[in-house]
Image (tube, rainbow, N blue to C red):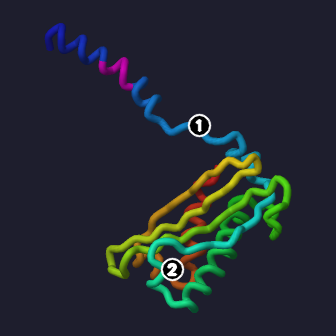
Amino acid sequence: MNRFQVSTLALTAALVPTAFAAAQAPALPAGWTNAALAGATYVILDPRIEGNPGLLNAEQQAGILKAMRTDSAGAISRHYPNAKFVTDPATPGAVKVSPVLVTPGALVPWAKLSARLDLQLADGSPVSLNESFGLLTLWQQGPQAANYAYDRIAQRLP
């Protein structure tokens, strides 16, 4: 290795940590801590289906929306056993949670759908947690599919 190659290697090694630090995600809101969220009060807002809801009939949509509401609250309470839940979105300091399901364009074996929790922290800061699932994976979960999906997402809470 000649002197030029050694200098280039040394310069690259010196710059990589700086470039990596600059490429990292922006800082999360101050309320995004285990201490702030573990004992917080939560309100589950109306869940919604995005994407291609035409893949589901009205009865299926109603059942899925109901499961999304209860199973997202259940996932949060399993992650934070001291969490409190209220129904009034105007409750001061409550973390507002919107469960979202994004359906694929078509029901094909390789399609994926996404489950998401959109949170508005007590200070008004928004945070979204999203995870994609293969249709086969959720089909294998049967009636526990929403529980499975939101438990996976809740694992990413601080």
Identity of the residue drawn at 22% across and 13% down: 6
Amino acid of disc 2:
Gln
Frontmost of labels 2 and 1 is 1
Identity of the residue drawn at 48% across and 67% down: 114
In this rendering, position of residue 38 left or right of residue 64: right
Which circle marks residue 157 in the picture?
A: none
Reading the image, the residue beneath label 2 is 141
Do residues under tags 2 and 1 come within 8 Å of each other at their CB atoms? no
Asked whether 97 or 155 is in front, the reply is 97
Q: Main secondary structure of the magenta part?
A: helix
Q: Position of residue 69 (x, y in %)?
A: 67, 74
* Residue sticking out furthest to the right: 92
Count of marks placed on residues: 2
Q: Position of residue 70 (x, y in %)?
A: 69, 76
Identity of the residue drawn at 68% across and 46% down: 32
Extent of the magenta region: 12-16
Quadrant of image for the N terminus:
top left
| Up-down relation of residue 117 to residue 10 (above or below) | below
Local secondary structure at mark 1 = loop
Which circle marks residue 27 in the picture?
A: 1
Q: Position of residue 65 (x, y in %)?
A: 62, 79
In this rendering, position of residue 158 left or right of residue 81: left
